[in-house]
């Protein structure tokens, strides 16, 4: 006795199994601690970590970048593509249902017999038929091939979403870094303007002394050379500042002429606290690590799908509806029909195509495993570099401040003695040059400190955590 179709489907589904290796999260070599040491208590970045710098201008620029950045918009579009691909892969697990309607007409000659031959009679016969009804086709996923394909698409969608988070983090970091450079350049311009004004005052004093014979023309020429040198620095700094502001236009998705914000001083910003925890905790804080793991999960699913391709494909199809030779009686009691067909196909020879697909999938998994290890090592390296850079730039800034204070006292003393006529211009020039250079270096060291802190925020995942991962809808 033939089992009814629903019962047959249930039996086949219960018999289904998945072919291939079960995915296990990759194991990475995690150090017990950082070479730079660990803070007493970890301070992970907040979701909107950039607000800790206390710059309303920076907050506005980042808001614009998150809304209008072409890189972020492209990443979001890739996420939508991956989600659509996931829905497409999930659709293959369901039956395909269609409705067909057909009408056929045929006209043929009716022959007549003349002896032993058939010859045209000049008469014709016409036939008509009509049909209407649904048709169902369903490939039973007995070996998990279609489910593995959906799992691979799900992993790809998740990896794409995580890549988008990495892109957003890179864009936000680039906006902050560019803004910091603009502020530092403005500080250097302010330093140059202050130094130029001081040098011009000294030049005026030396020129006045030369007119009464208490200073030489060489003294005037040497001070004039210093003034010219300081004045020549200004255009280059202004050019660099404008280039940084133009770069903000690219990051925020606006033309440079639309960037109206002007930089203030880097000294007015805060340095928000951030400190790494244990290296093992970093694995759950970086979207690129999570994306690499999702890629591995997808590769594992592709291997299972490739292995299942060696087994038979089982398809159930059915059709029902109405069929009659007259349209008027199409829905009559004798016109209803139903049919069901089950088929199994097994490829016997394909020239090694399926084995090649399996080998490619296995090699891809090996590649992604190596890539995962590289990403993990790079993450630890990023944190080490950022922590060390912030530590030493903080130390360097403190030392540079002491150098500025010392050189400021020396320049003040030299300027007073020059005006009193107790020292020559050379000593004053040396003191001035040392002060000017130290002030300029201080602005650059302060920028390096902010940039290293920014790098640490980025290295720690920028406020992302594994708990925020959401599986896209199927």
Image: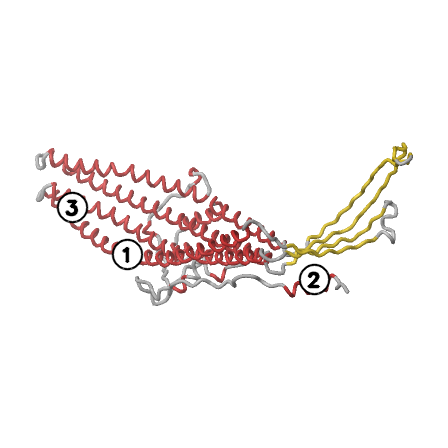
Along the line of sight, which residue is nearer the eye, 200 or 58? Answer: 58
Residue bearing mark 3: 431
Residue occupying the far front of the picture: 116
| Labels 1, 3: front one | 1
Residue bearing mark 1: 394
Indicate the position of residue 12 as horizontal and vertical percent values. Answer: 67, 63
Indicate the position of residue 151 as horizontal and vertical percent values. Answer: 56, 58
Quarter of the figure that contains the C terminus: bottom right
Label count reads 3
In-image side of 395 versus 464 (left or right): left
- What label does residue 9 carry, if any? 2
Against 304, residue 130 (above or below) is above
- Give the SS element for disc 2: helix
* Quadrant housing residue 281: bottom left
- Give the SS element for disc 3: helix
Q: Residue at x 88, y 38 (%)?
A: 125
* Quadrant housing residue 432: top left
Give whichever of discs 1 and 3 has the lower sequence position: 1
Residue 133 visible here: yes
Quarter of the figure that contains the N terminus: bottom right
Along the line of sight, which residue is nearer the eye, 69 or 90? Answer: 90
Indicate the position of residue 369 as horizontal and vertical percent values. Answer: 44, 57
- What label does residue 458 carry, if any? none
Mark 3 neighbour density, 10 Å: few (under 14) some (14–19) many (20 or more): many
Q: Residue at x 50, y 60 (%)?
A: 468
Give whichever of discs 2 and 3 has the lower sequence position: 2
- Give the SS element for disc 1: helix
Give whichever of discs 1 and 2 has the lower sequence position: 2
Indicate the position of residue 74 as horizontal and vertical percent values. Answer: 50, 45
């Amino acid at each position: 006795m033939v089992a009814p179709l629903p019962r047959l489907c249930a039996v086949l589904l219960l018999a289904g199994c998945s072919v291939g290796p079960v995915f296990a999260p990759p194991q990475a070599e995690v150090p017990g601690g950082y070479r730079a040491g660990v803070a007493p208590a970890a301070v992970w970045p907040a979701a909107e970590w950039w607000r800790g710098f206390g710059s309303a201008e920076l907050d506005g620029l980042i808001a614009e970048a998150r809304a209008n950045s072409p890189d972020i918009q492209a990443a979001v579009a890739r996420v939508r593509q991956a989600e659509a691909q996931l829905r497409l892969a999930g659709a293959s697990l369901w039956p395909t249902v269609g409705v067909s309607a057909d009408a056929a007409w045929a006209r043929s000659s009716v022959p007549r017999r003349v002896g032993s031959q058939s010859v045209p009679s000049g008469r014709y016969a016409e036939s008509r038929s009509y049909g209407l009804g649904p048709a169902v086709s369903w490939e039973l996923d007995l070996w998990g091939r279609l489910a593995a394909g959906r799992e691979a698409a799900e992993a790809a969608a998740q990896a794409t979403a995580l890549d988008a988070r990495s892109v957003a983090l890179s864009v936000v970091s680039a906006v902050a870094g560019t803004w910091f450079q603009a502020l530092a350049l403005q500080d250097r311009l302010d330093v140059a303007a202050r130094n130029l004004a001081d040098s011009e005052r000294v030049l005026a004093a030396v020129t006045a002394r030369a007119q009464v014979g208490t200073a030489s023309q060489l003294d005037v020429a040497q001070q004039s050379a210093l003034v010219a040198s300081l004045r020549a620095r200004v255009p280059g700094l202004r050019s660099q500042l404008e280039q940084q502001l133009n770069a903000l236009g690219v990051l925020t998705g606006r033309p440079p002429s639309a960037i109206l914000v002007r930089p203030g001083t880097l000294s007015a910003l805060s340095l928000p606290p951030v400190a790494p925890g244990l290296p093992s905790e970093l694995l759950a804080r970086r979207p690129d690590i999570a994306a690499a793991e999702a890629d591995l999960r997808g590769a594992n699913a592709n291997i299972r799908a490739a292995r299942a391709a060696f087994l038979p494909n089982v398809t159930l199809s059915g059709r029902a509806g109405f069929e009659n030779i007259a349209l008027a009686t199409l829905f009559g009691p004798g016109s209803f029909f139903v049919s069901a067909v089950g088929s199994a196909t097994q490829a016997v020879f394909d020239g090694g195509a399926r084995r090649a697909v399996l080998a490619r999938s296995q090699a891809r998994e090996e590649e992604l495993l190596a890539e995962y290890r590289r990403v993990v090592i790079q993450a630890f390296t990023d944190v080490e570099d950022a922590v060390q850079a912030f530590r030493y730039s903080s130390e360097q800034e403190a030392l540079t401040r002491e150098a500025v204070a010392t050189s400021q006292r020396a320049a003040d003393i030299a300027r007073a003695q020059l005006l009193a006529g107790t020292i020559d211009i050379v000593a004053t020039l040396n003191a001035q040059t040392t002060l000017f250079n130290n002030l300029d270096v201080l602005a650059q060291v302060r920028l390096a400190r902010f940039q290293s802190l920014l790098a640490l925020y980025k290295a720690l995942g920028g406020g992302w955590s594994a708990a925020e991962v959401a599986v896209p809808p199927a």
